[in-house]
Image (spheres, rainbow, N blue to C red):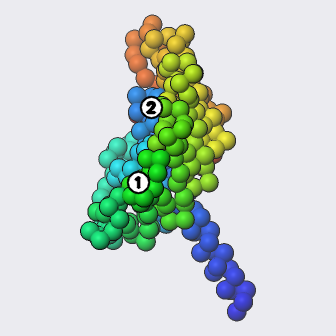
């Protein structure tokens, strides 16, 4: 009996951990962080802005041909609850539950520009760069779950400034101001994955080598 109980408990904890880890990171124009996404234990994607605001939630729809996903999520038909008018003014009216996933926010009494930002999704905690940080990254995500987010500062190459530099142990690099005008500023690598773009001498644009949707360290990175 005890053995079965331990197996059940281990399975429950594993499910909980899985449901509260970063699952996607999306960049627009091949360089700027668009959103990060967590997946709940019910398979619901929760997309979050770099400043800690929930953008949308739902499920992905994949095309019948090719590795193409609709950018807009399909609506989640399950339980969705919101904080009522009696809640803290910083998060009154914001979403509280998406399915079984509980979401909390920093309250109005918080300092450093945190009021109203996501505090937690399930057991995954969030933190943000405060008002003493570089002006380009103030208010942006510093911690999401177990992963630390670092950003390029005001002292970097002008095309790097304010862009995402690393998530945990996964570094992100960009083509510099000295590179071809067709792809300078765009992502050059994510972890060990390299991206090659068509140059201004080519008859087309976009990625020349690499995938727009790539798994790196258990996280799916998406270039749009």
In this orientation, which residue lies closer to the viewer: 97 or 17? Answer: 97
Q: Quadrant of the N terminus?
A: bottom right
Of tags 1 and 2, the one toward the viewer is 1
The residue lying at 40 percent from left, 28 percent from top is: 29
Count of numbered circles in the view: 2
Q: Which residue is mark 2?
A: 32
> Which class describes the residues within 10 Å of circle 1: few (<14), some (14-19), or many (20+)?
some
**Label 1 SS:** loop
- How packed mark 2 is, by other alpha carbons closer than 10 Å (few <14, some 14-19, many 20 or more), is some
Image: 43 above or below 141: below
Position of 6 with respect to 46 (left or right) is right
Marks 1 and 2, how far apart at CA: 24 Å
Which of 159 and 200 lies nearest the eye of the viewer? 159
Query: Left of 63 or right of it: where is 196?
Result: right
Q: Quadrant of the C terminus?
A: top left
Where's residue 44, x and y in %?
42, 60
**Vertical side of 188 occupied by 11: above or below:** below
Q: Position of residue 113 (x, y in %)?
A: 43, 47
Residue holding disc 1: 115
Q: Residue at x 66, y 75 (%)?
A: 10
How far from the left and from the top, in percent, is residue 169?
67, 41
Residue 78 visible in the snapshot: no
Residue 174 in percent (x, y) is at 55, 24
Q: Is residue 55 above or below residue 137?
A: below
């Amino acid at each position: 009996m005890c053995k079965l109980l331990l197996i059940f408990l281990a399975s429950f904890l594993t499910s909980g951990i899985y449901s509260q880890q970063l699952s996607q990171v999306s960049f627009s124009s091949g360089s700027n962080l668009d959103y990060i996404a967590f997946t709940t234990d019910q398979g619901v994607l929760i997309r979050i802005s770099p400043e800690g605001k929930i953008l949308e939630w739902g499920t992905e729809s994949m095309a019948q041909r090719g590795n193409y996903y609709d950018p807009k999520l399909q609506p989640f038909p399950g339980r969705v609850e919101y904080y009522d008018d009696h809640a803290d003014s910083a998060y009154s009216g914001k979403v509280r539950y998406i399915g079984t996933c509980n979401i909390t926010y920093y309250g109005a009494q918080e300092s450093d520009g945190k009021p109203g930002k996501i505090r937690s999704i399930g057991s995954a905690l969030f933190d943000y760069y405060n008002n003493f940080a570089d002006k380009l990254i103030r208010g942006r995500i510093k911690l999401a779950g177990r992963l630390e987010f670092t950003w390029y500062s005001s002292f970097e190459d002008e095309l790097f400034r304010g862009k995402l530099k690393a998530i945990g142990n996964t570094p992100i690099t960009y083509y510099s101001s000295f590179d071809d005008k067709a792809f300078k500023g765009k992502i050059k690598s994510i972890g060990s994955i390299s991206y090659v773009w068509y140059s201004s001498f080519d008859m087309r644009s976009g990625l020349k080598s690499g995938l727009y949707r790539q798994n790196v360290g258990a996280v799916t990175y998406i270039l749009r």
